[in-house]
Image: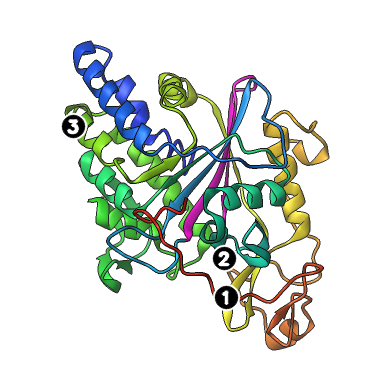
Amino acid sequence: MKRAQKIILLCLTAILMCTISVSAYFLLANQHLRKTLDNGYHPIKNGYHTKNKKDTEAFLIMGLDNTIERKLGTTRTDAMMVVTLNNKTKKITFCSLLRDSFVPIDSKNYHGNQRIEAAYTFDGPTASINTVEKLLNIPIDHYCVFNFLSFIKFIDAIGGIDIDVQHSFDGVTKDGPGAIHFDEGKQHVDGTKALSYARERHSDNDIMRGFRQQEIIQSVGNKLKSKEAVKNLTGIIDSFNNNIQTDITTDQLLDLMKNGLVYSDYEKQRLTFDWRTFSNQGRSMVELYPDSIDYVSHELRVSLGIDKKNEQDKKGFVFHTDGNYLYQSDYSVQDEAAEDKESTSLNGNTYIGTPDNTETGALPTVKTKNGFVP
């Protein structure tokens, strides 16, 4: 899968791929993997939709901004991605959800609109899945949540990765903004620097942030094929210990791993939204345009074999919103006159783009286990 290109399968694909010739070692690693993943197994009751067809699956991959070391009062999904897999058409579709997307939250503990990253805060993975299912009108078969610590440990366990920085910038670490510097060009980075690279969005925007995360997944995939990764299988597995939350069973993960090399040959599709930023009660939000949501929803439903293709699926088609204002505000801020005429907010405070919306409030303080909300 993509920024995902199996973020869930990331390290796991290599476990099978690299151990065929050393079966005894693989058996040991397999047992260790089962024990580690069983610790993070967390089934939930969700949904508005029935399970996808036999040949298709949809995954919601989430990265948390909290760990036992950070001890944040709230736990939010710093990254969210929907990945669909269609074994009949041999196609994988990736769709990143901007963390500040202002959407209706579907949770037993909150009713109204909030940044989509906050769904997890209110009711853990159940609220995140229900919110995404309702927003995109698709069924989610499985979810997987990682925290920052697992990411850092995993990258370090495989010996770091190679990235190609498009422009220099100062990144953010647990020590705060500007704690780490990136020069332009190709370079090898460890887990801490890779995480900073994956989270960066202030030097450009969220779209480029998504591209960086995709680049990291591809780099990880390449590194997992190396002898260095094979030598540290136990370290790779240990990076997930108490740092992962998922409803995927160990057997299901092992099946996905066995097909990892096959998936690498599948056609890849990447979906993005048209959107603009606005301020709500002094907080930055992202409005996903309704027609853009409809388009992305259709494409995901086609990828899952739910909808049939239409004019939008013809080769060469490029979607553009039909909104009455500039939609590229993530690249170029509109002038004052244009902002006064936009239909997103009222006096810069109350969002009125969605009927029956409510004002946002403070996020609740929740007790977590290593960053994970039950």
Please tell me which residue lies in front, 2 or 128: 128
The residue depicted at 34 percent of the width and 54 percent of the height is: 370
Amino acid at dot 3: Asn
Q: Which residue is mark 2?
A: 100
Residue 197: image quadrant is: bottom left
Mark 1 touching mark 2, by CB under 8 A? yes
Q: Quadrant of residue 329?
A: bottom right
The residue segment tinted magenta is 76-98
Question: What amino acid type is highlighted by mark number 1?
Answer: Ser
On residue 232, the disc is 3
- Mark before the other along the chain sequence, 1 or 2: 2
How far from the left and from the top, in percent, is residue 129?
60, 47
Instruction: Identify residue for label 1.
Output: 284
Is residue 212 inside the magenta stretch?
no
Which circle's residue, 1 or 3, is located before the other in the chain? 3
Q: Is residue 283 left or right of residue 276?
A: left
The location of residue 172, given as percent across then percent down, is: 32, 68
Residue drawn 67% across the image and 79% down it: 334
